[in-house]
Amino acid sequence: MTDGGDDAIRSVLIVGGGTAGWMTAAALAHAAPRGLAITLVESDAIGTVGVGEATIPPIRLFNQTLGIDEAEFLREAKGSFKLGIEFVGWGREGHRYFHPFGTHGKSFDLVAVHQHWLAAGGLDSGIAFDALSMAWGAARLGRFAAPMADPRSVASTFDYAYHFDAGLYARFLRRYAEARGVMRVEGRIAGHALEADRGHVASVTLEDGRVLAADLFVDCSGFRGLLIEEALATGYEDWTHWLPCDRAVAVPCVTGGDGLTPYTRSTARDAGWQWRIPLQHRTGNGYVYCSRHISDDEAAATLMANLDGEALGDPRPLRFTTGRRKLFWNRNVVAIGLSSGFMEPLESTSIHLIQAGIAKLLAYFPSRSFAAAGIAEYNRVAITEYERIRDFIILHYKLTQRSDTPLWRDCAAMPIPDTLAMKIAHFREAGRLVARDMDLFGPASWAAVHIGQFNIPEGRDPLLAYGDPTQSRAFVGKLAGAIGQMAESMPAHADWLKKIGALA
Ligand code: FAD
């Protein structure tokens, strides 16, 4: 039997209505407007994880593909713009650096911009590496405007993402999906039935006895993985030995301090790190920590003592095990969202992994014969994507020069994956940025973290020897000046939101 025709999937059941469930429902409704019955089951009694507010630039592509208007979405989800992440106290206590979206200037020859900065004296040049990033130029002044299209302008060298209330985003996508025919079922799943021959999930049963059957199941049920784990016992690969944080405590507060900053802040603490994510109506905060090094009460107290406005509720505890399912797609179940695995939100990658899961599901959309080759490829790509992100997150911990608490000492000394050790060694040797297929974060991101955390190259790009030695200094000086000037001319973040009609 070939794909399509009689063998086509006729029904999909999405299990769970968090960010993952409604993103999947909206995307499937958009991609298959006819002939595919899409049902989503969720339980208000169980609720959602209720956190997840910072994103990375590819989210814009997701919204654009669905035809979502940016201003309307920001209004509905009380969102703000994000130009990157400021890391405080990660490399050394009191030190700050910025991971920008976009690039550091633009290379004007074959030699990368960070190489010119190094040639100009690097840390001793009097010019911070961050000053070569347009995203930071605007972010540090609290400015924002859309990037310019003209590639000659320094204002074309940055990119952006959003901060938003994930619960409101899910509600927004629910309206989108329901308007396109997705059926929502309220109820708590209490059991499941497997097909006798293939072991596929045949149906789920709700507490009230209703049975929901489908050809394909998308498990968006959150950490417990109702189908991928509880029904199919897929197994989990634990990465806690590389990323030891296993808990978080979260609380929103009134926006104070630096106000509606167009960037996320991550501040290193004794046993982990704290996020600050400004939305239109509040600021999201959380302390991600390692339970071996701090008690839950101490973590909550640390968070509450470090808010920049009055807390809007009690601190909410969350537990997780960093790692991934052994398979993301098992038989007729595809796990998307927290059911598929979890990496701490240091680089805001979870919602992106939902998007990546959906994109792959559409690329390898099965027929009812569920050909093994497509499923295998889905899993291969998903595993690689996960591992590439894992390495980038570990980089932040491994490169720390802090030795003030056990967590940071352990992280600096821990063994790391070979795939990451190789990248650190290349950068240290001559500032080389070695890319691997399916790296989500590009050279500018890696350079920002290497340099921001003092993995300063011992050698230089040999090509520099063939250029004019004074040119590097002139280039970085000019670039920093142009960025500074451009940033001054940009509107305040809140003014831009107002201008485009995005303020709720
Ligand atoms: P959930 O939100 O847990 O939804 C699960 C759904 O399944 C719910 O609708 C629930 O009702 C339903 N369900 C479960 N069991 C049943 C049942 N038996 N019957 C019926 N329905 C059921 N991501 C980012 O991209 N950026 C961030 O800044 C970020 N910060 C985070 C901070 C923390 C501390 C944590 C833990 C996560 C963070 N994330 C972040 C991840 C992000 O929150 C999730 O990726 C995202 O919310 C998707 O969650 P989900 O939809 O998979 O699961």
Image (cartoon, grey):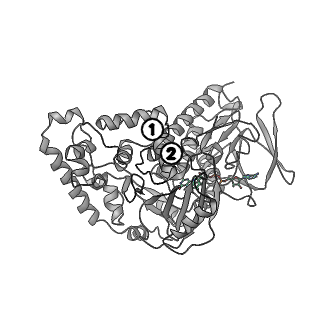
Residue type (three-letter) at the residue carrying disc 1:
Asp
Q: Nearer the viewer, residue 224 or 382?
A: 224
* 483 lies above or below 24: below
Of the two numbered discs 2 and 1 on the same chain, state the one appearing first in sequence: 2
* Residue at which label 2 appears: 410
Q: Give the Cα distance between marks 2 and 1.
A: 26 Å
Determine which of the numbered discs, if any, sits on residue 439 in the image.
1
Q: Residue 150's x, y, as percent?
A: 27, 52
Q: Residue furthest right?
A: 209
The number of numbered discs placed on residues in the rendered structure image is 2
The three-letter amino acid code for the residue at tag 2 is: Asp
Mark 2 residue element: helix
Quarter the N terminus occupies: top right
Residue 340 falls in which quadrant of the image? top right
Farthest top residue? Answer: 1
Location of residue 477 in the rendering, given as x and y in whole percent from the top left corner: 19, 53
